[in-house]
Amino acid sequence: MPGLAADSRDGTVVRATGIARRLVGESAFVPPVAGVPCVVAWTRYGLHDPVQPAGNKPLVIERWQIKPFILDAPPLHVIVDAGHIELMLPSRSDGNLQEISVAEGQRITVIGTVLHDGIELPADEQAFRDMRVGCKLVGNRAHPVVITASVSDTLAG
C-alpha cells in the first residue's frame, strides 16, 4: 500500500503515520478508561441487571465517539474524517468497561481513501497557528478508515 504523498490522487487508498491532533474549535471528550482527551474512542459497558439471576448474560452497550481530527504527518497535514472506522489498537479494561481509544498527541498509522475536495477551513475558523491541510483521509462501510499503532512504535515495542 502506498504512503500518502502530496500528489496522491483522489480515491487512492494510502497509509500515513503521524500525530493525532484535535481540529481547532472541536471540543474534547475524555473516555472513562483513557482519562485523557481523545479524538476517537470505542467503549463497551457490560451491565448486570440486579433483578435477573446471576447466570444471565450482562446487557452490553457499545459507544463510539469519533471526531474529525488532524494527522500531523510532516510535511503533510491531513484531516481524518472517519464515517466508518476500524481500530486495530490494544484495548484497556477497567472492571466492566473495555475501551480502545486514540488520544490527542498519540502517534498512529491511518489507512484511508484520499479526498481533496472540500478541505479548506473557512478563514474565520483558522487560527494563527493552524496548519494548511493537504487532503482528507476518509472511509465508508466497504472501505473503513483503519487506525493502528505506528509502524515505528510496533517495531520498538
Image: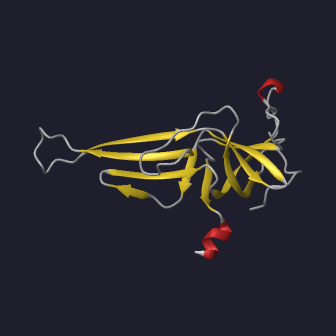
How was this image coloured?
Answer: secondary structure
Residue 122: image location, x then y, percent: 80, 26
The residue at 42%/51% (across/down) is 33
Q: Residue at x 61, y 53 (%)?
A: 146
12 over 154 or under it: above or below = above
**Quick one: quadrant of the N terminus?**
bottom right
Q: Residue furthest bottom?
A: 156
Q: Residue at x 38, y 57 (%)?
A: 93
Is the C terminus in the top left, top right, bottom left or bottom right quadrant? bottom right
Indicate left or right for 147 with 53 as reference. right
* Whole-percent x, y for residue 49 in the image: 18, 40
Residue 53 spot, x, y in % from top left: 10, 45
Residue 14, percent from left and from top: 75, 55
Left or right: 157 with respect to 81? left
| Among the 4 quarters of the image, the one containing residue 133 | top right
Judge by depth and name the residue closer to the eye, 126 or 68: 126
Q: Residue furthest front?
A: 128
Q: Residue at x 65, y 63 (%)?
A: 150
Pick the residue in front: 95 or 5.
95
| 122 up-or-down from 59: above or below | above
Horizontally, is 83 left or right of 30 in the view? right
